[in-house]
Structure formats: C-alpha cells, structure tokens
Image: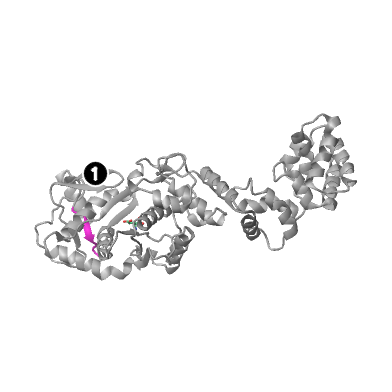
Amino acid sequence: MSGPRFRFAPSPTGFFHVGGARTALFNWALARRLGGRFVLRIEDTDEARNRPEWTEGIISALEWLGISTADPTFEGPYLQSDNAAAHLEAARALAESGRAYWCAMTPEEIAERAAADGVTGYGGWSRDLGLDEGPGRVLRFRVPEGETTVIDSVRGEVVFDNSVIEDFVLVRGNGTPVFNLANVVDDHLMGITHVVRAEEHLSNTPKQQMLWEALGHTPPAWGHVPVLVNEQRKKLSKRRDKVALEQYREEGYLAEAMVNYLMTLGWSAGDDVEIRPWSEIESLFRLEEVNLSPAFFDVRKLGAFNGEYIRMMTAEEFAAECGRWVPESWDRDRLSVIVPHLQPRLVTFSDLEGTVDFLFGPVVVDEASWEKAMSAEFASPLLAATRSAYAGLPDWSAEVLKETLETVMEPFELKLGKAQAPVRVAVTGRTVGPPLFESLEALGRAESLDRIDAALARLSG
Ligand code: GLU
C-alpha cells in the first residue's frame, strides 16, 4: 500500500451529523490532494447500532457531499464488526507480552478500594496477581510510567502525564473489545497513516498511541479538529440543534453550498474568499491551518452560502430544480413566469412552495398582513382605482402593471412600496413575497381582478 491512507470511521446513529460531514470532507480533501486513500469504516460494534440501513444512510450522505464510492480514492466500506476476531487476538497478544493483565475486580470492589485508598478510579490493584482470562474478568492495559506526547497536526505537541491515565479496560467482562482497542487494531489492519477526527477523541489518543506502541507498530499522524458549536457556544447536540445532514438536504440546501460552508468552519485559506469550488478547496486545504477554537455552525450563514450557490446556477438549472420542489399538479407555464424572479432571492428550495403557492391555489389571507395593509384610509379607494385601471389594460405584463399602479397612486401621494401593499395582500394574502407585478403577470388578469374584487368586498362589508 503506497500513499497516505486517511479514514472516516463513523459510529452509525441513524442520522449523519454535520460535524461528521465536515470531518469526512477534511479527510477527503487531504486524501485527494495527496493522492492517497479515503477509507470508510463503519464502527458498528455496538449491537444496537448494527442496522444495515444506517450504513446505507452514511453512504448516501457521503455521496451527496461528493465523496463518491466510485472514485478511486474511496475504499470500503469496512465493518468493524467483521474484525472482532482480530481485536481479541490483539488483546491476547497484549496479555501474553505482559502489556495487559486480567482483572477480576467488580465496579463495587473498585469503588470501595478507591475510597479506602483515597484515590479516584482504578489503582492498578490486580496488576501483579497473574490472573488468567476467565468469566467476568476484564483485560486492562498496563499504563507505563512517564508521559505520552501526541504530535497533532492541528494542535502541535500535546503532552499527557501517564499518571492520570488509569489502567484502562481493553476487553469487557462479557468478552467484547472496547472502542480504543478495536479502533487501533482496525486502523493498523487497514494501513491507516493519518487519523483526522473530532477533538472529542483527543483524550483517547494517548491511550491509543500507547496501544499502537505496545502492539509493536508506529502510530499514525494525528489531527484533531475543533468541535462545532451553536449560537450559545455549546457543542451542537441532537436535542438542541438541527444537526442531521439529511434534514438540510430535505430542506433544499444544495450539496455544493453545504460542502463549501462546512469547509469554512475552522479553516480558511488565509484570504478573504469564502465561496469557492471544491476543486480549489481541495488544492488549498491544509490541516495545519485549521484553527483551535470551536467553530460556530451558523444556519443563517449556511443560508447565505446556499443563496450564493442558487445565484450561480444557470437559469435552466434553477428552473429545473424548482420544478422538482413543487407539486406535480402545479401549472408549469405559470411557474415558468415567476421562477426567474425568484432566483435572486431564494434561500432554500424548500421555501419555494410556500413562497408561490398563492399562484396555484386559492388565496389564503394572513390576518396580520391584512390588518397591516388594509387598515390605511387609502387602501379601499386605491384598490378600487387600481382594479378599474387594470381591467382596461390592453397588455397584461409586469412592466405595464407597474406603470399603471404608479399612475393610479399619484393622487394618493404614496410611495410605490406603500401603494403596493393593499394590492399585494389582496392578491397574495401576505405582505411579503415574490415581486408583485411579476406575480400578477403570472396569475393572469381574470384571477387577479377576482382577488382584488374579493378584497374590496371584504373592505366594504
Ligand atoms: N467511531 C468514532 C466516532 O464516530 C470515531 C472514531 C475515530 O474517528 O477514531 O466518534
């Protein structure tokens, strides 16, 4: 195996965390630029997490991000559960070499002994008992004295005092290997040279590095990237925050925008450019330039990126994408009149339906909007004057509709924005929405006038 080997090792959870997406992309960018491999390993050893559809979900999310299983850089997926025998073999090798030992103490016995000795945690009490493997016994790693220095591409040298690391468990009483052992054995078996992952694993790293060394192998290069936080600077959590990549996908964020935005979280190329294509990101990204502070996952900023990417689409691409986000039953001709006017302002495609639904069904009046627009003295006379001017127009186009309203509003001494409001609420039911005159054009004369008539009736009734 030649070339650097990166990996992404998610534990299936049923959804794909945006932080995991960023970790995957960091690894992907590095593997691609350096001509290496991106290995996908599903860490599925937790029985409850062994659902094939969750693995499919991970792959589908990666594909959406542009991490293609068909790309020669991609390797896998491997399942951690397939390696169980190797994990236990490594555990026994460590027991045989004396780097690990069996321990029969129960958690209660450990707690009692720790209280009596005035220590916290496990004090290595079974180290020299020479116990054999047996039912209920755990295998513990014999943590050597001294220090463990982790060389991390993001954080530099991180020194851990081994005296604060207890003799940690490698194999549980029920015979199953723990995360640290399985993770290290798999990384070794898969020839991983670079481990780039979330900062929350930094505390595991001295233990893992000791395991690499005890097993007689050279540890990989490490890189721990800062976590993503919300507006309150709290770590993104499933309970509090919208963290599932799938949800953003369903809401109509574009994959390119999401990918670009994720790559700006904790990293910049040192210039002021934020929006750039993947090909550039891939050639510029350096782990050494990732900063140490937690990165704010700002949904509003993501929306701004998405808007930028929408603006970059060709008119044809945009129209085709819009077509996918509205009901089949909607009149395509009518849609095609309004769509070009949405491209400059749309944030996500899931906003589309609610923005233009008034063109494809009966107007639903928002009462707060009605109150705001129709309580003015001028609302009713202006609407009536507009109605009669519109009724006689030879040409029903946005431009003419606008000019006509401008003429009608003159005696009322109003600005266009004010004068538009009653017409907009009459026709769309809301005070905000797509450009009014283009909406009227799309809706057509008969329906527009009907809606104005209905509003006038309500105002006089
Ligand atoms: N399975 C671990 C997780 O999802 C990742 C382990 C690693 O990257 O080393 O948090």
Q: Which image quadrant is residue 387 in? A: top right
Provide residue 278's location: percent of width, then percent of height: 46, 53
Asked whether the viewer can see residue 331, the reply is no
Task: Please name the amino acid that badge 1 sits on.
Answer: Val
Residue stretch in magenta: 167-174
Residue 225 visible in the snapshot:
yes
Is-magenta flag for residue 437?
A: no
Rendered-image quadrant of the C terminus: top right
Residue 250, above or below 424: below
Instruction: Give the percent coordinates (x, y) of residue 9.
Output: 35, 59
**Above or below: residue 195 compared with residue 305:** below
Say how the picture is coloured.
one colour
Q: Position of residue 265 (x, y in %)?
A: 43, 45
State left or right for residue 363 relative to residue 300: right
Report ligand 1 position as a quadrant.
bottom left
Which residue, given by chain and number where applicable, does mark 1 sit on?
158
Residue 418 appears left or right of 100: right
At x 14%, y 63%, the residue is 95
Q: Tell me the SS state at disc 1.
A: strand
The secondary structure that dominates the magenta segment is loop
What residue is shown at x 88% (from left), y 38% (from top)? 385
**Residue at horizontal 43%, vertical 50%?**
281
Residue reaching furthest top?
413
Q: Is residue 31 above or below residue 274?
A: below
Q: Left or right: where does residue 420 sit relative to residue 255?
A: right
